[in-house]
Amino acid sequence: MGYYYIGALLLATGIVWVNPHPVTGDTGPPPIVDEHIRKIAMFAKPSPMVLIPGGWFLMGTNRREDRGHGFETHYDDTEFSQRRIGIDAFHIDRYEVSLGEYLTFLQDTNRMVSQELRGLIWHLLSVHFIPDQALAPWPALYVTWEEAKDFCTHHGKRLPSEAEWEKTARGEAARIFPWGEMDPSPELAVFGQYHMHEIPLVATVDSFADGQSIYGVFHLAGNIAEWVNDWLGPDYYPIMPERNPPGPKSGRYKVVRGGSWKSRPVMLRAATRGGAFPEERSATIGFRCAKNSP
């Protein structure tokens, strides 16, 4: 399964099904794929980080009944109510964590590459003839929340909080999309794609500069959705602290933000919330890291 977008009653709306063996069948790819995995990792380039200034911003969306459905109105009730939230300054990766970086981490920590990702890599190499170097700047995918957290820790970083992620995407003035108020278009983001074999139709992590946020952070809408640190609380916004909200203490889903290559335009709104089981591996979910500002 893919990640869930949470409606007013926490109903799953827009679940993405991902074949656990998307292209190679139950037998899995041949051992030679491991040599390609090592080569992809060799081309890894770490993301620079961007300073997000401390201060107040508007998080969430106010209920509006005076106009019909549109990007300026809420997606579901979990965005209520809009709050003025204070955030300490922090740094966040300019780019999503790349496939090359993720594979390097798995090698350095003696972790197995998941069968889903091995199968995908082999298919891309053997059927589509994509070279190792071209796969390295793809966004990491088929990553569990725990792996994302451990990756960030391994590099002296952490996953961003949901509030930090939203400030990065919206700025102080509650932008609808990271780039502003313009409707999503193929020039601004990767979204609305489909492939019958679940081959991700993603872009490299350093592409689509026209869609960057006001702080210069790329792909906060579309391409690959992103794990953040918080548990998903559908009723959390009205009771969250006004400074540095950490999210609920427990939950069933971890928050996923930003929409992916398969998402409808409404899912690219910077305020739209989603969630997934922490152990989920999906062709639509990746991550980026953050760290406290000195």
Image (cartoon, rainbow, N blue to C red):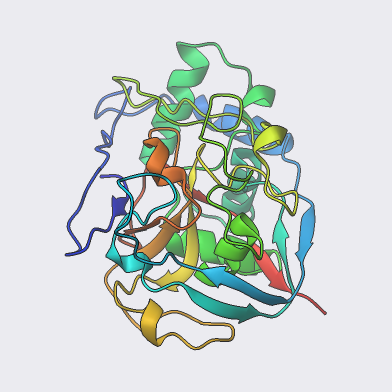
Farthest-out residue, right: 294
Asked if residue 161 can be seen in this view, the reply is: no
Q: Is residue 108 left or right of residue 82?
A: right
Q: Nearer the viewer, residue 204 or 41?
A: 204
User: In the picture provided, is 188 more to the left or to the right than 73?
Assistant: right
Placement of the N terminus among the 4 image quadrants: top left
- Quarter holding the C terminus is bottom right
Give the quarter of the image for residue 266.
top left
Identity of the residue drawn at 69% across and 25% down: 133
Q: In the image, what residue occupies the spot 37% across and 82% down? A: 238
Q: Residue at x 34, y 61 (%)?
A: 64
Front-most of 238 and 275?
238
Residue in view at x 37 percent, y 66 percent: 79
Q: Tell me residue 169's x, y (percent).
A: 60, 55
Query: Which residue is at the front of the view, 176 or 280?
Result: 176
Answer yes or no: is residue 131 visible: yes
Above or below, comparing residue 138 to residue 133 in the picture? below
From this view, report whether residue 87 is shown above or below residue 210: below
At which x and y percent is residue 192? 40, 28
Q: Is residue 56 left or right of residue 140?
A: right
Give the vertical position of 285 relative to 125 (above or below). Answer: below
Number of marks present in the image shown: 0
In the rendered image of this protein, does residue 117 appear above or below residue 68?
above
**Res. 215 image quadrant:** bottom right
* Residue closest to the eye, 110 or 281: 281
Q: Tell me where residue 93 appears, x and y as whole percent.
A: 70, 55
